[in-house]
C-alpha cells in the first residue's frame, strides 16, 4: 500500500530522477528553486504534457498509474490524487461552500473538514473576499473533500506571512492525524519540513541526494551545500524592536520578529555573517556571542570551511582564511565563540 514511484522526467534540458515511497502522513520534498521538486510532483500527477517526457513506474495502493515499459499511463483525473497549488486555484464566481462542494467526493467528512480548517464562517463568501491564508484553507479543504487516495502539495504556503503559515501548518498536522493517505509536500522552507515531515527527501539538480529525518536532510544540506544555518529558539522578551530569545541555555538577540512571547521561532543565519573568536570581545555592535566547539574543518583550496556545534546541538557553518585559521589555532573539538549581529538573523 501507499505511494511508490521511480521516475525519470525530462523537461527541456532539465532531467529529474526521483525514487520515493510515501505511507500515510507527510513525505516532504525539500530543496532550492530549480531542484526538481515541482517537476517530480507534475510527474506523479501526470500533468507533464507528452508521455515521452516521463518514464518509470508509479503505483498507488497497488494500482499501477504509470508503467512506461508496458505502456500504462493513467490520465491525471483518474489517478485518485488531488493537488493544492501556491495560489489555491479556487473558482472566483463560486462561494466557498460551492467551491468545496465542487470536490465531488462522497463528502461524508464534510463537518469534520469544515471544523478542522475553521471554514464555517467563510462558507457564504467568495474567494476575492478572503485573505491569502483563508483561500489556502479552502483549497486544502476542497482537496480533502474529494476523498483522494493521495494528496500533493506544491509549496502551498510560500506566499503567506509567518503567522498565517504557522496557523495552516497546525491545520495540516491535524488533517494528517485524521487521514490515512500519502501526502507529498514540496517546500524550500526548513520550518515547514520540520513541522510536517517524519521523512524528507533532499533534491538537488534533479537528483535525490539525501533522505531521512528532517534533521538528517538539513545536516546534509549544510555540510554539502554550505547553505544558511537554521536556529530554533523561543521568544522570551521584547524590548521595542529588539527581541530576546532562548537557544537552549544561551540568550539570542534578534530584531523585528513576527512572533509572540512564548513562540518557537526559526531563524536563518548566513555563514558569511558569522565571525569566530577565542575570547569574548568588548565594545562591539554584534549582540550575539555563542560558545561552541569545532566539529568539522575542510580545507577548500586555501579557505577553511568550519562547522560548529552549539550547546543546544544546533550547527553553524562559516569560512575563514588560512591566516585566520592559523591565528585562531582552530582544532577539531576545540572551543570557539561565534559572533554575529542581531540584524543578521532572518525569520524563516
Image: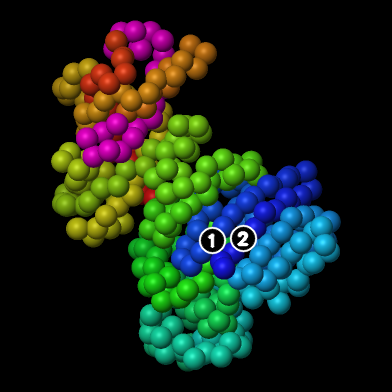
- Residue 38 in picture, x, y percent from top left: 63, 56
Question: Residue 270 is drawn in which quadrant?
Answer: top left
Of pointers 2 and 1, the one earlier in the residue sequence: 2
Q: To which residue does mark 2 refer?
A: 4
134 relative position to 20: left or right = left
Asked if the residue under mark 1 is in contact with the one under mark 2, i.e. CB atoms within 8 Å, the reply is yes
Residue at image position (35%, 12%) is 325
Callout 1: few (<14), some (14-19), or many (20+) C-alpha neighbours within 10 Å? many
Q: Is residue 177 above or below residue 157?
A: below
- Which secondary structure, mark 2? strand
Seen from the viewer's position, the closer of residues 246 and 313 is: 313
Residue at image position (42%, 38%) is 219
Give yes or no for residue 327 being in the magenta stretch: yes
User: Is residue 314 visible to the viewer in this orientation of the structure?
Assistant: yes
Inter-mark Cα distance, 2 to 1? 7 Å
- Residue 30 in picture, x, y percent from top left: 52, 50
Give yes or no for residue 14 being in the magenta stretch: no
- Which secondary structure, mark 1? strand
Residue at image position (57%, 68%) is 1
Seen from the viewer's position, the closer of residues 318 and 313 is: 313
Question: Residue 176 is drawn in which quadrant?
Answer: bottom left
Q: To which residue does mark 1 refer?
A: 22
44 relative position to 257: left or right = right
Segment colored magenta:
309-328
219 relative position to 312: left or right = right
- Residue 119 in picture, x, y percent from top left: 42, 84
User: Is residue 135 visible to the viewer in this orientation of the structure?
Assistant: no
Residue at image position (46%, 15%) is 299
Callout 2: few (<14), some (14-19), or many (20+) C-alpha neighbours within 10 Å? many
- Residue 193 in picture, x, y percent from top left: 44, 54
Amino acid at each position: 500500500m501507499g505511494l511508490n514511484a521511480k521516475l525519470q522526467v525530462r523537461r527541456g534540458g532539465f532531467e529529474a530522477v526521483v525514487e520515493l515511497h510515501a505511507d500515510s502522513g507527510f513525505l516532504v520534498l525539500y530543496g532550492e528553486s530549480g531542484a526538481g521538486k515541482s517537476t517530480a510532483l507534475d510527474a506523479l500527477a501526470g500533468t507533464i504534457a507528452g508521455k515521452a517526457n516521463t518514464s518509470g513506474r508509479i503505483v498507488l495502493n497497488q494500482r499501477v498509474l504509470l508503467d512506461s515499459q508496458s505502456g500504462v499511463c493513467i490520465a491525471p483525473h483518474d489517478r485518485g490524487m488531488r493537488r493544492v497549488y501556491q495560489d489555491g486555484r479556487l473558482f472566483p464566481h463560486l462561494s466557498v461552500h460551492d467551491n468545496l462542494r465542487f470536490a465531488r467526493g462522497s463528502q461524508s467528512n464534510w463537518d469534520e473538514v469544515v471544523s478542522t480548517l475553521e471554514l464555517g464562517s467563510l462558507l457564504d463568501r467568495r474567494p476575492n473576499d478572503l485573505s491569502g491564508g483563508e483561500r489556502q484553507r479552502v483549497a486544502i479543504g476542497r482537496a480533502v473533500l474529494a476523498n483522494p487516495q493521495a494528496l500533493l502539495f506544491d509549496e502551498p504556503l510560500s506566499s503567506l506571512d509567518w503567522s498565517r503559515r504557522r496557523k495552516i501548518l497546525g491545520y495540516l498536522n491535524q488533517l494528517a492525524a485524521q487521514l490515512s493517505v500519502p501526502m507529498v509536500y514540496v517546500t524550500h522552507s526548513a520550518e515547514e519540513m520540520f513541522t510536517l515531515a517524519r521523512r524528507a527527501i533532499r533534491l538537488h539538480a534533479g537528483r535525490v541526494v539525501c533522505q531521512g529525518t528532517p534533521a538528517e536532510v538539513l545536516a546534509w544540506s549544510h555540510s554539502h551545500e554550505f547553505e544558511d544555518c537554521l536556529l530554533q529558539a523561543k521568544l522570551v522578551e521584547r524590548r521595542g524592536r529588539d527581541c530576546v530569545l532562548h537557544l537552549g541555555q544561551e540568550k539570542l538577540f534578534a530584531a523585528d520578529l513576527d512572533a509572540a512571547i512564548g513562540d518557537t521561532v526559526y531563524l536563518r543565519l548566513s555563514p558569511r555573517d558569522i565571525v569566530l573568536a577565542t575570547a569574548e570581545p568588548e565594545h562591539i555592535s554584534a549582540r550575539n556571542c555563542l560558545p561552541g566547539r569545532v566539529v568539522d574543518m575542510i580545507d577548500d583550496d586555501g579557505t577553511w570551511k568550519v562547522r560548529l556545534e552549539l550547546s543546544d546541538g544546533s550547527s553553524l557553518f562559516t569560512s575563514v582564511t588560512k591566516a585566520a585559521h592559523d591565528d585562531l589555532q582552530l582544532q577539531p573539538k576545540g572551543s570557539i565563540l561565534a559572533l554575529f549581529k542581531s540584524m543578521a538573523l532572518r525569520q524563516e
